[in-house]
Amino acid sequence: MFWKFDLHSSSHIDTLLEREDVTLKELMDEEDVLQECKAQNRKLIEFLLKAECLEDLVSFVIEEPPQDMDEKIRYKYPNISCELLTSDVSQMNDRLGEDESLLMKLYSFLLNDSPLNPLLASFFSKVLSILISRKPEQIVEFLKKKRDFVDLLIKHIGTSAIMDLLLRLLTCIEPPQPRQDVLNWLNEEKIIQRLVEIVHPSQEEDRHSNASQSLCEIVRLSRDQMLQIQNSTEPDPLLATLEKQEIIEQLLSNIFHKEKNESAIVSAIQILLTLLETRRPTFEGHIEICPPGMSHSACSVNKSVLEAIRGRLGSFHELLLEPPKKSVMKTTWGVLDPPVGNTRLNVIRLISSLLQTNTSSINGDLMELNSIGVILDMFFKYTWNNFLHTQVEICIALILASPFENTENSTITDQDSTGDNLLLKHLFQKCQLIERILDAWEMNEKKQAEGGRRHGYMGHLTRIANCIVHSTDKGPNSALVQQLIKDLPDEVRERWETFCASSLGETNKRNTVDLGNIALFEACCKERIQQFDDGGSDEEDIWEEKHIAFAPESQRRSSSGSTDSEESTDSEEEDGAKQDLFEPSSASTEDKMEVDLNEPPNWSANFDVPMETTHGAPLDSVGSDVWSTEEPMPTKETGWASFSEFTSSLSTKDSLRSNSPVEMETSTEPMDPLTPTVAALAVQPEAPGSMAMEASSDGEEDAESADKVTETVMNGGMKETLSLTVDAKTETAVFKSEEGKLSTSQDAACKDVEESPETAEAKSAAPRAPSSSPERRTDQPSLPGDTSVNGPV
């Protein structure tokens, strides 16, 4: 077997390791060093576990490479060192985790000044993360001993790799108790308070972003852990600290301190949005109180968070009116002065999240500030800001679909929907939502009628209008919405009813997919495809063995209709494929000449019936017993036509041959309309009985254009003479039935005895009539002993 032989070529690394003076860099220069390390190459692992090698690997990871090196290879060795140390080799993890000197050398990277090299920081973070995952107890114990570890994390939090290391410390420790110990340790180190302090206008944007992202991930990870361990007796200390009202107030105090810094504001709002991630809105008339699988207590918003935000609603509303200064923005359709900006967009997202909580006190403050009216003004002012339009649509849908809150016990109830929903009344009455929709729609239609462009908010405006119609029919507020529409001025109510019946209905009809058209289109495509599908089970197999026969002239096609099927092919595949192009014949089986299509493309003829030409020259060299009824030789397949001994009686100098019995090429010369084309072929079973043939040629009558051979086919007492006309100029062959020469003579009988090879050889040497037509061009040379009928007959 193949694997018995040791054909595996040994790695060049093994050869290097046999040297006593091999260096670490020489091994790292090998392309397969990482592959061999992960494959647990024993010699390589033993070499890397040497104290000096491990120390060099750690040095490559944490030390800045020389500045004078080519930038393309400058970080080659640090990168390979990092990959070797993180290849998850247990011996290497054990050695690194247990050797405190190596850990101290690795830890020293955090002692560098800010900013850290981001690439080296990623190498350092990756190595320390794999050690935390594989050796959690040893590494955490080592880090706890370092009093400045959390300080250094905060110092370098602007580097993304250091932020990732902090999150790895929370996620890579799987056992519950060690993880809880880490959370308690980080909480004691006041990691939350330190991260909140970073979200301040005086800090850099990178620090804002990474501190905010760290706090958001801490919230999500803590809540996910609460879902997985619902019976945990200890709450997550980091989440509990962040949800304290004083922490949120400190965060908001930082961002509203004197100057307005967009980066700090947006980062703080992202933290608030994460704390408010409890309910998901839907536009079908209800909101989802909690995500699937979560209990109400697990997803409820901490009241301290809402109270802290409520105390700053006025400041957030002021941001909608006067956002941080931004330069004028020129666009392809106009000038934005000022643009919406990231600050106002995130404030609207915060309002949307507050509406999901459906807190009566916050709803009342929003009504008093008219924050909903302000964001509606922005909706129609900034025509092309789809981010803004989406958030405004969500706010309106929440107001329309939210159930009412019982102000006495602050619980959500679905009592009589005609209750006192002040925010919904505010939306219809003070904000005049219906009037603004109608005015904006009419303005857009007028603008389009004048050749202008359709407003960018029209799709969202259509969805808002549909949401109102839906809330009128269904939902917890249907009765109140109906009453509010009924209380509209008569003119406005009539406009709204007309709008819903005409413009809105027509728009919805255009936007609705007509399933009937889709089905019709698919059916049409299927019908078109079926026209080219040839894999049906009921269709003929072109490779199936079948018999063909020459039909009488009355069944033949006209000359003009059959030229496309007269081309000759040199392969069995093309011959079989063209069978379906011929018209079936209804003639009796006695009048058909059998030809088997499954014979390989080496055609030959051997007729044993003597033939005479019109010049008297015998064609007794042509003969075959294939037309007789005598049983064939047992070693030879039956039903095959053999033309191997057929020789030309008109020319002895044919040098070119073809493997096809008759070359059927479409003629480009005009033909005699009275001359029939090749007879149609029909698939018929083998006809019993014997046939007799007589051949004659008329080479002198039409020497310029054709050589002619006639064959008389006998069926019982009837004879039918078929003429084969070969046109030398146009290189075509035509069969013709000469009905006028039919005879009832019984003198001609089929010869049932196969001639001997000696007789055939003698006949082949008989004199032949000179050829009166030029040599025929053929596409393929003949095999030895093969005489083609493409040449002069």
Image: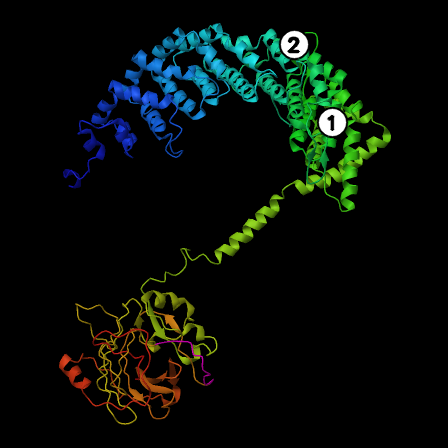
Q: In the rendered structure, which segment of residues is drawn in magenta?
A: 663-673
User: Between residues 162 and 296, which one lies in front from this camera angle?
Assistant: 162
Q: Given the current orientation, which residue lies at the most extreme front position?
A: 68
Which quarter of the rendered picture does the C terminus lie within? bottom left
Q: Which mark is residue 376?
A: 1
Amino acid identity at mark 1: Leu
- In the picture, measured across the screen, residue 594 lies left or right of residue 483, that is left
On screen, residue 748 versus residue 359, left or right, reads left
**Residue sitting nearer the eye, 608 or 88:** 88
Query: Is 21 positioned to the left or the right of 469 in the image?
Result: left
Q: Position of residue 266 (x, y in %)?
A: 61, 21
* Front one among 768 and 191: 191
Which residue is denoted by mark 2 in the rendering? 307
- Crowding at label 1, few (<14), some or many (≥20) Cα neighbours within 10 Å? many
SS for tag 1? helix
User: Where is residue 784 shown, x and y percent of the image?
Assistant: 21, 75
Q: Quadrant of the N terminus?
A: top left
- Say what amino acid the circle numbered 2 marks: Glu
Secondary structure of the magenta portion, mostly?
Answer: loop
